[in-house]
Image (tube, helix red, strand yellow):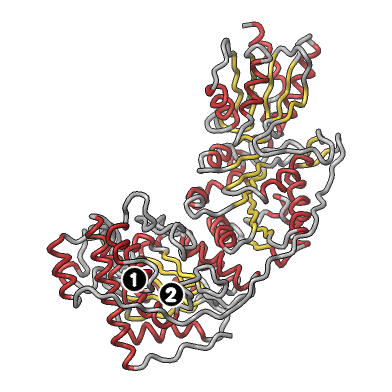
């Protein structure tokens, strides 16, 4: 237990007010110097941050990675001038950097916060993400690290229109995250005008309490009232605390207070000079609050890894192999955690939930929060694997897009991909997932075809930085590879070949098996096919693909259970374009149109990606 902060003495009030004035002044100065920024959104929250920094944020500013440090997240990332003013007041950002580095090229004080600046855990600015990310950090502190740190999240009222915020409130309540404190800056105004609830604090309170939190409504400019509210984070209980602070946008400079059309606009030089003078001028207070508790975070002991094996020819669904491989990985490495979107009995993650329940987090049907929780867990050094149906991961696209900006490592697994799933129909068919993940900066996209390659790639993912994605299949297919076969990221396998092949067939996952069947059909007609397993879609084995195609007279058929845009075919075309092959003849078979229900084989045939269509395409290339 931490010692509760003592009540503010009257003599302390003036110091905190002075700090609040400094934060406002520096927010104005920084944004005016840069010629852009959000000073009014910063000014509304300055009193809240002054009390927090001076009185409640337990943080060693000289050691931003100290394990006992509290965490401060600006979910309203556009208030970055305020965040950087806080860092200046703590003595870790100079006034010169604030004035000459904010929003400038190749400087760390970016327009919206990123982890380039020590002490910033996650990138924010895409509204609705900071609080969900904070839930992940709080999950780690309470349920994995059992550490005393607290997670403070400053939110804007506009972002409470985002469904992801309510997913976060719901999961914070479900997991009893009393170490998470949400401070909502209710300043009434969004970008273009009033928010949907304005200053209806009763409505905010009712909504927050309906999601299982303790709600406190306060005057966000009353220093003593703010202090009392923040101190209540120390009270025992089983519900997270949400402080709803009624504030005024632009507070501190009367001409812009509560004025529409001032969002995201710096003050003019004359306005800035008048505002700074009215606030008492520039200050250089150095304010550091309570120290964090000294705790030791031991490095986890990693045991030897023994992955499951799958005999050649034995049929297994790659989603099931994923579950078995994840359990083995989790037993060997205590940093491995798993999350799922309430479909773990289908994705394979249910095995992990059953055997390693203390490191499994059920996110229910809340894919945005699932990815955000994984982001927070990654910040704390865990190795998260998150799974759902491939189709449903598209709901979390913006969170995935932001992962590289936050410099986190996420391991995503999408099952039930493609038309192969059959009778469930198109609402369940992931046909865009490869394109989604391939477009993410620095991502890795993997699509295994059997159990052996699946568990090998699960092991690879654990050591892969950035966002990695494993696409798994619903149906069971025969094993192709011996146990122990290596599957490096960026590699491929030549599954069928001879010294004098006529055409290359490239597939991945289910279409690899169809390509092998097509190869057998072609052999019956005297046509020799070279079959490539492109299990690494990104990065693709470009050299291997070019060599195979060049070795078969430039003739190649690419088949994928995915839309034509952004998937395997696009990767192959990009590889061939790097070093164009003379006399290239390429057929790209992909899903075009909206499928319906049916059996897997029926739908593969409808889409034109089954063995018969692959063989026909190969014959067409040879006839041409």
The residue wearing badge 1 is 186
Note whether residue 163 is visible. Answer: no
Dividing the image into 4 quarters, which one contains the N terminus?
bottom right
Residue at far bottom of view: 10
Left or right of 391 on screen, residue 459: right
Residue 206 image label = 2
Horizontal and vertical percent position of residue 74? 41, 65
Asked if residue 575 is positioned above or below residue 501 in the image, the reply reads below
Which comes before the other along the chain, label 2 or label 1? 1
- Report x, y in % for residue 318: 74, 42
Which residue is located at x 32 percent, y 64 percent? 81
Q: Residue 237 is drawn in which quadrant?
A: bottom right
Residue 522: give x, y in percent of width and height. 76, 14
Task: Determine which quarter of the picture holds residue 39.
Answer: bottom left
Q: Can residue 564 be seen from the camera position used here?
A: yes
Whether 314 is drawn above or below 336: the answer is above
Q: Estimate how packed mark 1 is, as few (under 14), some (14 to 19) or many (20 or more) residues with alpha carbons within 10 Å.
A: many
- Mark 2 residue element: helix
Q: Quadrant of the C terminus?
A: top right
Closer to the camera in the image, 587 or 60: 60
In this view, which residue lies farthest toward the top? Answer: 623
**Residue under the image location 76 percent in, 12 percent down:** 500
The dot on residue 508 is: none
Mark 2 vs mark 1, foreground winner is 1
Position of residue 280 in the picture relative to residue 367 (left or right): left
| Cα distance in 3D space between marks 2 and 1 | 15 Å
In the rendered image, the vertical position of residue 99 relative to residue 534, given as above or below? below
């Amino acid at each position: 237990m931490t010692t509760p902060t003592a009540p503010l003495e009257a003599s302390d009030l003036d110091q905190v007010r002075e700090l609040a004035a400094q934060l406002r002044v520096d927010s104005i100065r920084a944004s005016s110097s840069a010629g852009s920024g959000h000073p009014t959104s910063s000014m509304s929250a300055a009193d809240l941050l002054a009390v927090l920094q001076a009185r409640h944020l337990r943080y060693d500013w000289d050691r931003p990675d100290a394990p006992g440090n509290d965490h401060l997240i600006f979910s309203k990332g556009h208030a970055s001038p305020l965040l950087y003013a806080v860092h200046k007041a703590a003595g870790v950002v100079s006034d010169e950097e604030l004035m000459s580095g904010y929003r400038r090229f190749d400087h760390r004080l970016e327009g919206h916060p990123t982890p380039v600046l020590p002490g910033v855990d996650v990138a924010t600015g895409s509204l609705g993400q900071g609080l969900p990310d904070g839930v992940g950090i709080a999950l780690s502190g309470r349920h994995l690290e059992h550490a005393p740190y607290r997670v403070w999240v400053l939110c804007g009222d506009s972002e409470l229109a985002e469904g992801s915020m309510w997913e976060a409130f719901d999961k914070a309540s479900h997991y009893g995250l009393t170490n998470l404190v949400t401070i909502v800056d209710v300043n009434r105004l969004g970008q273009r005008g009033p928010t949907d609830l304005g200053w209806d604090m009763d409505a905010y309170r009712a909504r927050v309490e309906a999601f299982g939190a303790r709600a406190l409504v306060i005057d966000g400019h009353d220093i003593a009232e703010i202090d009392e509210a923040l101190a209540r984070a120390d009270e025992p209980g089983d519900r997270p605390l949400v402080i709803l602070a009624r504030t005024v946008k632009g507070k501190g400079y009367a001409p812009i207070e509560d004025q529409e059309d001032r969002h995201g606009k710096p003050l003019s030089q004359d306005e800035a000079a008048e505002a700074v003078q009215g606030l008492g001028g520039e200050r250089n207070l150095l304010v550091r609050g309570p120290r964090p508790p000294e705790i030791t975070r031991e490095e986890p002991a990693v045991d030897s890894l023994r992955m499951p094996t799958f005999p050649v020819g034995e049929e297994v669904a790659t989603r099931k192999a994923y579950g078995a491989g994840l359990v083995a990985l989790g037993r060997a490495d205590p940093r491995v955690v798993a999350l799922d979107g309430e479909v773990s009995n289908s994705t394979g993650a249910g095995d992990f939930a059953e055997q390693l329940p203390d490191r499994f987090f059920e996110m229910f049907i809340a894919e945005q929060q699932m990815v955000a929780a994984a982001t927070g867990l990654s910040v704390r050094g865990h190795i998260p694997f998150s799974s759902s149906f491939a189709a449903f991961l598209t709901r979390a696209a913006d969170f995935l897009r932001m992962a590289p900006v936050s410099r986190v490592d996420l391991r995503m697994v999408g099952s039930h991909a493609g038309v192969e799933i059959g009778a469930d129909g198109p609402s369940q068919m992931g046909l865009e997932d490869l394109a989604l993940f391939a477009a993410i900066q620095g991502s890795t996209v993997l699509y295994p075809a059997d159990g052996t390659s699946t568990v090998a790639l699960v092991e690879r993912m654990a050591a892969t930085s950035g966002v990695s994605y494993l696409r798994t299949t619903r149906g069971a297919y025969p094993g192709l590879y011996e146990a122990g076969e290596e599957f490096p990221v960026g590699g491929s396998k030549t599954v069928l070949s001879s010294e004098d092949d006529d055409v290359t067939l490239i597939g991945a996952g289910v279409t690899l098996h169809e390509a092998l069947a097509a190869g057998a059909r072609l052999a019956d007609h005297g046509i020799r096919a070279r079959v490539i397993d492109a299990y690494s879609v990104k990065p693709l084995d470009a050299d291997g693909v070019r060599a195979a195609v060049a070795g078969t007279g430039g003739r190649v058929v690419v088949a994928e259970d995915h839309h034509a845009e952004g998937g395997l075919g696009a990767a192959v075309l990009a590889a061939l374009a790097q070093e164009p092959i003379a006399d290239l003849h390429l057929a790209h078979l992909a899903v075009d149109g909206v499928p319906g229900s049916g059996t897997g084989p029926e739908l593969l045939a409808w889409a034109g990606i089954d063995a018969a269509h692959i063989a026909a395409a190969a014959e067409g290339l040879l006839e041409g």
